[in-house]
Each structure stands twice: as C-alpha cells, then as structure tokens.
Image (cartoon, rainbow, N blue to C red):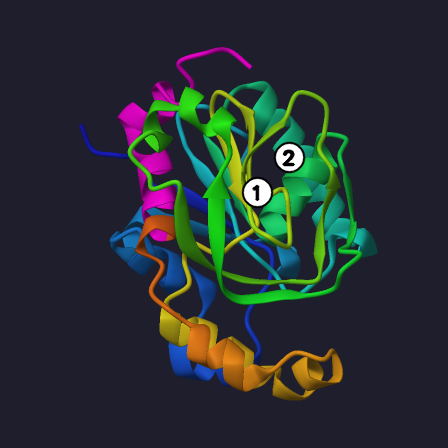
Amino acid sequence: MKKKPIILIQVGTPPEDVRRGFGDLPLWFSRALNLGPDMLQVVRVFEGEQLPRPDSNYSAIVTGSWSMVTDREPWSEKTAEWIQEAIRIEMPLFGVCYGHQLMAHALGGIVDYHPNGREIGSQTIELLPEANTLPMLRSYPQRFQAHLTHLQTIIELPPGARALGRSQHDPHQIVQYGRRAMSTQFHPEFTAEIMAAIINARTDSLRQEGLSPEKLLDDVSEASAAAYLLRDFLQWDAIDHMAAEPL
C-alpha cells in the first residue's frame, strides 16, 4: 500500500545566506528522511497557508523557526490549536525546536527564554531512564550527538508529558506527549554543514554572548543518531508501537 505524504508544517525559513547555500527547510527534511519531494505536503503556516484538518491516517512534522513562541503570532497560535486537535485524535506528530516548544505551549506547558542563554552547535544528548519504555529508543546509544540552535526552551512540561532526553544545558531535549506524539529541541534535519553555516551566520552575536564561534565550529560533528530518531518515529510500525507502556 502506498504511503500517504507527510504534512510538513513549516513555521519559518532560514536567513537568506543560509538558504542560498542549502535551500529551504522542506529540502532539509526530505533529505534527512530520504524521501522524494512528493512525499512531503508542505504547508507554510507562517505565510498564512491553511492546514488541512487533523487526520490520524497521516503524520506531520512541525519545523523549527527563526521566530519566538512567546511572540504569540496569530499564525503560531492557530497552529497551536491545530496541534491540540491532532494530539487529541492521536495523529502522529513530531515537533522540532520551535515545533517542540509550540507543542508544549499548545498543551499547557510554559515556554520562555532559557535562563542560561543560547544553546548552539553539536552537543551531547543523554537518554533518560524513561526512554527505555519506548521500544524505538532501546537500540539507541545512551549518549549521542545532535545539532542545536535555540534561545527559548520548554521551562515547564505540559501535564502528562515526559522528558526522555536531556543535554547539559537543557533538561527537555526529547519529549513524549502521548503514544503518537514526540518532539526534540535539537534539529534532526541538520547536517554538519548546515550547523556550521548557522554558526558562521551568527558569529557577531555569539561573540557578544561570550561564546567562541571558532570552538563551536571545531566541535561540529556528524549527528546520525539524531537524524535516525526522526526517521524511526515516522516508520508506520514504530508509530503504532512507540510506547509499550502507557503514560
């Protein structure tokens, strides 16, 4: 049976210099997922495009953004309402960075600026003991590399959600919201080259914040396990058996 397209809820677009070198977010996700462009139904909600009604027979990804969840932009709040309904009907849903924070906000969590500032670059993610309850995570290494860039974060999880992974900087790197909903603060769609380009694009800001762009660039590494997490979630068999134990 032919798989249905994945709905890619695009909530932003990279700066022009990054986009010129690497394309827009749909290309990043299609390559990370090893899917043809026809397998992604892109909805650019940040430009006013309308989402289809949530449908549990489809799956969806909410991308990252260069906006802030706390700005409560109308398109963002409307997408949050859509997320509420999608999770209610158990539509498979995966959020990334802004999407990760927006899912938490939609379900009653608290999102704000991280008290310790920006997290950026290739960083170590550590799985928490709760991750062992998910069959799809049992084969993952206890620690793996992932690419990050964010100022805001989930300050408080929504009711019923649980953290499955953390970094030294952020305790909510992987969050599960239900049997068919998960999000990551890190970017599984980034390559090492994209991560380096984003660091280079923010050199001045990073120096002003007391960070070393040179060290961050030296530390950029491949992050294959992070990319596999997104792919594994979107496998039909993994979606239906993500949680062997109820939340």
In the rendered structure, are the residues bearing label 2 and label 1 in contact, judged by CB atoms less than 8 Å apart? yes
Please identify, in this view, whether the residue under mark 2 or under mark 1 is nearer the observer. 2
Magenta residues? 227-247
Disc nearer the start of the sequence (2/1): 1
Residue at mark 2:
82
Where the C terminus falls, by quadrant?
top right
Residue at x-position 30% and y-position 60%: 31
Q: Is residue 244 magenta?
A: yes
Residue at mark 1:
51
Q: Rounded to the nearest whole Å, what is the CA distance between mark 2 and mark 1? A: 8 Å
Of the residues shown, which amino acid type is indicated by label 1? Leu
The picture places residue 229, in percent across and down from the top left corner, at 37, 43
- For the residue labelled by badge 1, is the local secondary structure a helix, a strand or a loop? loop
Q: Is residue 58 left or right of residue 114?
A: left
- For the residue labelled by badge 2, is the local secondary structure a helix, a strand or a loop? helix
Task: Place residue 102 in its image quadrant.
Answer: top right
Where the N terminus falls, by quadrant?
top left
Q: Tell me if residue 186 can be seen.
A: yes
Q: Is residue 73 left or right of residue 42?
A: right
Q: Is residue 63 above or below residue 220?
A: above
Crowding around mark 2 (Cα neighbors within 10 Å: few <14, some 14 to 19, many 20+) is some
Residue at x-position 45% and y-position 11%: 245
The picture places residue 161, in percent across and down from the top left corner, at 63, 26
